[in-house]
Image (tube, rainbow, N blue to C red):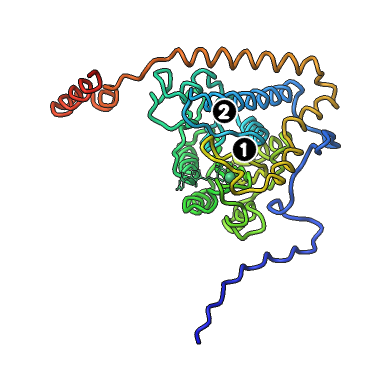
C-alpha cells in the first residue's frame, strides 16, 4: 500500500557557537526599552527632537485617519501604529536629494519630506486636491518635490523600481542614494530576487529596507520563509546586511546612516531588516483578531517605539511633560486644520480621464466621453 508522508519542515540550522555574530544575525539596539543607553549617539539634540516630533505626528495622523475611515469620510486606510520608528528613523538618514521608493507603510516619510498633510488627506479622499486626482488607491501617496516616488501596489515591484533607479543614478553619475522599502511579505516575491541580485551585481547605490512587521496581511513569519532571519538572505546575494531593532529610532537611524554613507562612497547596496510589529490590521478592511493571538499584540505594545524614545529624551533632559502637552496640542490642531482643508476639495473632473492622456482627443473618444458625461448628468 502506498503511503503518503507529510513533508517535514526543515529545522532551522543550530546556531553556531561564535562570539561574534554577523550583522544579519544579531539585533542592533541603541536605546533599551526603559529609554537608557550607554552608546554615544551622533545626532544633534535638535535632530533628535525633530525625529520625536515626526513620530508623534505620524501616530496622531494614523489615529485620526482611522477615525475618518470609520466615519466614511475616506476610503480605506493602512495604519502604521508601532512602526513609526522604523519609517522615521530610516528616512531621516537620507539626504533630501536622495530618492525614496516606498512600499505600504512609509507615508510618514513623504510627510517628513514636506508633503502637506491636507494633500495627503486629499489622497485618501481622492478629490481634486489629490496629486493623482483620485486614480490611485488610498495611502499611495506621491510627492515629486520631495523625491518620493508613487508606489506600485504589486508587492515586491517596489524593490525592482528602487534598484533600477539606483542603477540609473550610477550610470548617470548622479550623487544620490536610493531608499527601497519593502515589507517582510515582499521578500517572498519574485522581484525580491531580481532586485537583490541586480543591486549586488551592479553595486547599485541603494539601501534596501525591509520593515519586518511580522505579518503579511494574515500570513505570519513562520509561513513566509524558513530562514532564521530575513537579513541573512542578503548573504546569498553577496550584499552586506544589518538586523536592527525597528522600534528603536536611534538604532534605525544609525544603521541606515551607515548604509547610506557606504552606498554614497561607491561601495554598493546594503540590506536592512528592521524588526518591528504591525499592531493594527493590515488595513481598515482587515480584522486581525481572526488570525492572531491578542497576547502577541499586547507583548509588542510594551515595546512601543514612541514611548521608548520619549523616555530616552526625558532621561537626556531634552523633554518635559509640558513640552509633550504642547506638542500634542499643536499636532492635533495641525491635523484638524488639514482635514478641514482637504475636505474643501471638489470632485475630480470626469473628462480629465481622457484629456489628461490625449492632447487632441480622438473623435470616437470625444463621442464616448460626451455620452458618459450626459449619462452622469441625467
Ligand atoms: C503580487 C501581489 N500579491 C498580493 C497582493 C495583495 N497584498 C497587498 S499587501 C500584501 C501583504 C504585504 O505584506 P508585507 O510585504 O509584509 O507588508 P506589510 O503590509 O506587512 O507592510 C498582499 C499580499 C499584492 N498587492 N501584490
Ligand atoms: Mg509585513
Kindly identify which residue carries mark 2. Answer: 66
Which corner quadrant of the image does residue 108 belong to? top right
Q: What is the tally of numbered marks visible in this picture?
A: 2
Pointer 2 and pointer 1: residues touching (CB < 8 Å)? yes
Between 125 and 144, the one lying in front of the other is 125
**Sooner in the amino-acid sequence: mark 2 or mark 1:** 2
**Pointer 1: residues within 10 angstroms few (<14), some, or many (20+)?**
some
Between 213 and 299, the one lying in front of the other is 299
| Above/below status of 322 relative to 68 | above
**Mark 2 vs ligand 1: CB below 8 Å:** no
Q: Position of residue 352 (x, y in %)?
A: 29, 22
> How far separated are the C-alphas under marks 2 and 1?
10 Å
Kindly identify which residue carries mark 1. Answer: 280
On the rendered structure, is 370 left or right of 23? left
Q: Position of residue 83 (x, y in %)?
A: 65, 36
Between 363 and 198, the one lying in front of the other is 363
Q: Residue at x 47, y 52 (%)?
A: 194
Amino acid at each position: 500500500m502506498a503511503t503518503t508522508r507529510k513533508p517535514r519542515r526543515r529545522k532551522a540550522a543550530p546556531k553556531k557557537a561564535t562570539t561574534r555574530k554577523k550583522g544579519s544575525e544579531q539585533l542592533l539596539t541603541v536605546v533599551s526599552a526603559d529609554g537608557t543607553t550607554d552608546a554615544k549617539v551622533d545626532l544633534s539634540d535638535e535632530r533628535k527632537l525633530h525625529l520625536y516630533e515626526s513620530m508623534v505626528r505620524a501616530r496622531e495622523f494614523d489615529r485620526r485617519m482611522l477615525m475618518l475611515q470609520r466615519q466614511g469620510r475616506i476610503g480605506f486606510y493602512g495604519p502604521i501604529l508601532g512602526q513609526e520608528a522604523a519609517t522615521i528613523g530610516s528616512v531621516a538618514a537620507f539626504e533630501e536629494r536622495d530618492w525614496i521608493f516606498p512600499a505600504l507603510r512609509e507615508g510618514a516619510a513623504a510627510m517628513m519630506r514636506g508633503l502637506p498633510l491636507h494633500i495627503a488627506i486629499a489622497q485618501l479622499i481622492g478629490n481634486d486636491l489629490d496629486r493623482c486626482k483620485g486614480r490611485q488607491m488610498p495611502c499611495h501617496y506621491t510627492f515629486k518635490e520631495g523625491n518620493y516616488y508613487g508606489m506600485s501596489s504589486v508587492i515586491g515591484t517596489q524593490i525592482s523600481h528602487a534598484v533600477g533607479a539606483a542603477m540609473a543614478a550610477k550610470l548617470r553619475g548622479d550623487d544620490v542614494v536610493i531608499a527601497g522599502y519593502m515589507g517582510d511579505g515582499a521578500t517572498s516575491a519574485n522581484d525580491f530576487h531580481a532586485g537583490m541580485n541586480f543591486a549586488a551585481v551592479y553595486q547599485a547605490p541603494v539601501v534596501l529596507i525591509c520593515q519586518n512587521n511580522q505579518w503579511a496581511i494574515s500570513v505570519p513569519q513562520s509561513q513566509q520563509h524558513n530562514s532564521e532571519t530575513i537579513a541573512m538572505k542578503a548573504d546569498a546575494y553577496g550584499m552586506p546586511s544589518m538586523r536592527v531593532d525597528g522600534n528603536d529610532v536611534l538604532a534605525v537611524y544609525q544603521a541606515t546612516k551607515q548604509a547610506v554613507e557606504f552606498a554614497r562612497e561607491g561601495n554598493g547596496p546594503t540590506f536592512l531588516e528592521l524588526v518591528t510589529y504591525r499592531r493594527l490590521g493590515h488595513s481598515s478592511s482587515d480584522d486581525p483578531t481572526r488570525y492572531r493571538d491578542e497576547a502577541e499584540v499586547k507583548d509588542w505594545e510594551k515595546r512601543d517605539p514612541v514611548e521608548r524614545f520619549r523616555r530616552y529624551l526625558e532621561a537626556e533632559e531634552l523633554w518635559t511633560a509640558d513640552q509633550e502637552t504642547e506638542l500634542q496640542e499643536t499636532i492635533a490642531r495641525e491635523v484638524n486644520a488639514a482635514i478641514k482643508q482637504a475636505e474643501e476639495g471638489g470632485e475630480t473632473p470626469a473628462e480629465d480621464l481622457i484629456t489628461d492622456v490625449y492632447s487632441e482627443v480622438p473623435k470616437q473618444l470625444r463621442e464616448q466621453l460626451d455620452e458618459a458625461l450626459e449619462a452622469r448628468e441625467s
